Amino acid sequence: SDNTDLEKGRSLDHNDKASARTRARKALEKVFGLENNEGSTARDHLANERTYLAWMRTCMSLIGFGIVLAKFTNDMLSLIAGAMFVFLGFILFIYSSIRYYFVMSLLKRKKFAANSWGLAIVTILALIFMVVAVVLIFLARVSNGGSDVGGGGSSGGGSGGSGSGGSGSGGSA
């Protein structure tokens, strides 16, 4: 009788633990949106995540380039060009986030929509921004007399060096 009570108690305790684990697992599945891996479900979602991360790397590169361009130049046109790259990075960040969640919702419904118009618009926008930025940087260089932004002092130093060399040769003669 004692053995059966222990066995019953143990089995009830075991069942309670199992049901608690089951409830916890189901709660986590709801929170994290766990789906059955049928066909190419997992592969498609992982590909969507990889694409999103590639967009994020591109956005960070554009923003970083814009900050460097704005930080290490002294003229207003280069500052505007840098701000344009930062702005383009933020625009692409917003676009890629919207696209990621849109594709994720489509994949959950076993659907997919090609992104031809979105990519065309992003490509045209990026080309426009880059051409304008290059023109602004070129205009900044021309307005500075064609000297490098950081190299203006070095070209002056080069002429000063030849001048001091002339003085040295004049002093020894």
Image: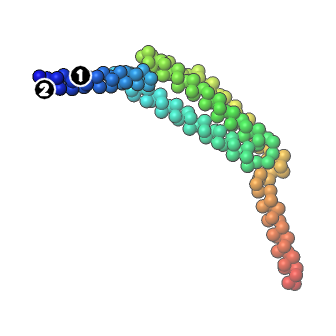
Query: Disc 2 residue type?
Result: Asn
70 displayed left or right of 110: right
Between 18 and 141, the residue placed more toward the observer is 18
Residue receiving disc 2: 3
Q: Residues within 10 Å of mark 2 (few under 14, many from 20)?
A: few
Q: Residue 98 occupies which quadrant of the picture?
A: top right
- The reply to whether residue 130 is in sight is no
Residue receiving disc 1: 12
**Residue extending farthest front:** 2
Q: Residue 84 occupies which quadrant of the picture?
A: top right
Q: Position of residue 72 (x, y in %)?
A: 73, 49
Above or below, 155 against 118 in this view is: below
Instruction: Find numbered disc 1 in the image and state the secondary structure of the residue it sits on.
Output: helix
Give the position of the C terminus as an image quadrant.
bottom right
- The reply to whether residue 164 is in sight is yes
Give the position of the N terminus as an image quadrant.
top left
Q: Residues within 10 Å of mark 1 (few under 14, many from 20)?
A: few
Q: Residue 112 bears which disc, if any? A: none
Between 49 and 14, the residue placed more toward the observer is 14
Above or below, 134 against 28 in this view is: below
The residue that appears at 61% across and 31% down in the rendered structure is: 93
Q: CA distance from mark 2 to mark 1?
A: 14 Å
171 displayed left or right of 80: right
Instruction: Find numbered disc 2 in the image and state the secondary structure of the residue it sits on.
Output: helix
The residue that appears at 80% across and 53% down in the rendered structure is: 147
Q: Position of residue 159 (x, y in %)?
A: 83, 65
Q: Position of residue 86 (x, y in %)?
A: 68, 36
Q: Nearer the viewer, mark 2 or mark 1?
A: 2
The residue that appears at 84% across and 79% down in the rendered structure is: 169
The residue that appears at 56% across and 38% down in the rendered structure is: 57
Task: Confirm or deny contact between disc 2 and disc 1 (CB under 8 A).
Answer: no
